[in-house]
């Protein structure tokens, strides 16, 4: 999801940030102006305010804002002192940053195949991937739906290994009434503009249960210092800009409302798709997202499965309906990551990667546009 799809002519946005800005223009501008006036562009008061609000929102003990979701993953792993020789279990069906953070530290991402319905890591396959080198499990709460944390935390506990949620797509999601980012020892969120809660640049956050890990994350984000010019560990420049925190504070005020709107949009898509494909031959039926009854997804993406994807996408594009593929190539097939897992196969991730497309999805998508998307989708599938 590392892009914001561009507007095609005056057509539909894949993710419409302009309507949201029209709604929030005043509070956002006011918040930005306040930062310009006080001039604390790094670690200004807004940063702390945001951290407190986010920790409270998800029910986590600690929130440490950082420069991106990727840096949040990196800092979470560094707080656990993960490095060369260590293994981290994760999913091959995710954005590259998940495995990248592991590999950047010299550790090895060990992939485990996904659940066919939720697309999240299959907890039933994790245990056989645990070795004496395993230091952490990093499930991704993909498309905005939490992974199965009760089972994953259970495995973590049995083997004494940490669980880090890649929550880059799931802030605001719930799992058994508890919020994403507060389901395991550490979590990493992203505020990339196209995420459900997005800033106007780069931003992320680490969430921690444990005070010690939170302190380490705080130190790591400022060059590993525990006080000015005193460096107790090797860290990085990982701070969130105050301007981004200010923008997020304005957006956070309407976030719950937007989450409700996203539910409505997703439900409407589901109903429209069911209706549009009701009389179709089985091989032409489109598969809507499956959400576990104990989950509330934030639908960071509304991702469906279609037959003959290239033709479907091409036809939809010709009718000015933007689509995206999250993700076309599972990570064990990426040139930079293929070596470690040579010969291992992840048939479900492979099958799903060939079939998924994401439809336009945001809190401001109106009924008329959704009708158009599904009508064109139906035409596209019938021709494909
Ligand atoms: C977006 C994303 C990231 C990276 O977040 P950035 O803020 O873009 O660095 C990591 N993991 C997943 C699953 C993502 O979708």
Image (cartoon, rainbow, N blue to C red):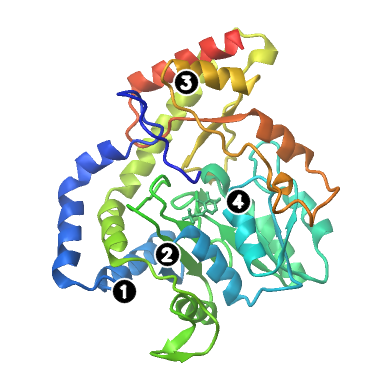
Instruction: Give the residue number, with chain letter if any, for mark 1.
Output: 43
Query: Is 355 positioned to the left or the right of 11 in the image?
Result: right
Instruction: Give the residue number, with chain letter if any, for mark 4.
Output: 96
Quadrant, the C terminus: top right
Query: Is 152 positioned to the left or the right of 231 in the image?
Result: right
Mark closest to the chain's N terminus, 4 or 1: 1
Separation of residues labelled 1 and 2 (CA atoms): 11 Å
Instruction: Give the residue number, with chain letter if any, for mark 3.
Output: 317
The kind of secondary structure element at disc 1 is loop
Instruction: Give the percent coordinates (x, y) of residue 209.
Output: 52, 72
In the figure, 52 relative to 179: above or below? below
Residue 99 placement: quadrant: bottom right
Q: Is mark 4 within 8 Å of ligand 1?
A: no
Separation of residues labelled 2 and 3 (CA atoms): 34 Å
Separation of residues labelled 4 and 3 (CA atoms): 25 Å
In the figure, 46 relative to 91: above or below? below
Categorize mark 2 by other alpha carbons within 10 Å: few (<14), some (14-19), many (20+): many
* Farthest right residue in view: 343
Mark closest to the chain's N terminus, 2 or 4: 2
Is residue 305 visible in the rendered image? The answer is yes
Mark closest to the chain's N terminus, 2 or 3: 2
The kind of secondary structure element at disc 2 is loop
Instruction: Give the percent coordinates (x, y) of residue 108.
Output: 73, 63
The dot on residue 67 is 2
Residue 309 placement: quadrant: top right
Q: Which residue occupies 55% across, 63% down?
A: 73
């Amino acid at each position: 999801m590392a892009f914001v799809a561009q507007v095609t002519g005056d057509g539909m946005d894949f993710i419409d940030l302009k309507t949201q800005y029209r709604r929030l223009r005043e509070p956002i501008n006011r918040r930005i102006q306040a930062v310009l006036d006080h001039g604390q562009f790094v670690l200004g008061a807004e940063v702390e305010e945001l951290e407190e609000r986010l920790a409270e929102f998800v029910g986590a003990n600690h929130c440490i804002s950082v420069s991106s979701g990727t840096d949040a993953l990196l800092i979470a792993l560094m707080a656990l002192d993960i490095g060369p020789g260590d293994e981290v279990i994760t999913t091959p069906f995710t954005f590259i940053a998940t495995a990248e953070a592991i590999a950047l530290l010299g550790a090895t991402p060990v992939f485990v195949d996904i659940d066919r319905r939720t697309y999240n890591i299959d907890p039933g396959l994790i245990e056989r991937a645990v070795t004496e080198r395993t230091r952490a499990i990093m499930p991704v709460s993909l498309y905005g739906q939490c992974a199965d944390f009760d089972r994953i935390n259970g495995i973590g506990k049995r083997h004494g290994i940490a669980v880090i949620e890649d929550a880059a797509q799931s802030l605001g999601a719930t799992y058994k009434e508890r919020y994403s980012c507060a389901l395991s020892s550490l979590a990493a969120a992203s505020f990339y503009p196209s995420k459900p809660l997005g800033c106007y640049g780069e931003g992320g956050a680490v969430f921690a249960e444990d005070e010690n890990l939170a302190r380490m994350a705080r130190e790591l984000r400022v060059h590993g210092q525990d006080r000015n010019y005193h460096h107790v560990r090797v860290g990085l420049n990982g701070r969130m800009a105050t301007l981004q925190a200010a923008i997020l504070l304005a957006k956070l005020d309407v976030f719950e409302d937007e989450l409700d709107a996203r539910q409505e949009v997703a439900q409407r898509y589901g109903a429209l798709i069911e209706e549009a494909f009701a009389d179709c031959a089985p091989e032409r039926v489109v598969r809507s997202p499956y959400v576990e009854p104990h989950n509330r997804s934030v639908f960071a993406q509304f991702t469906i499965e279609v037959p003959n994807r290239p033709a479907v996408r091409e036809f939809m594009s010709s009718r000015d309906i933007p689509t995206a593929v999250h993700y076309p190539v599972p990570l064990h097939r990426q040139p930079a990551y293929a070596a470690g897992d040579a010969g291992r196969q992840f048939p479900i991730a492979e099958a799903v990667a060939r079939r998924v497309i994401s439809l336009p999805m945001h809190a401001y998508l109106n009924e008329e546009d959704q009708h158009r998307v599904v009508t064109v989708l139906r035409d596209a599938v019938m021709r494909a």
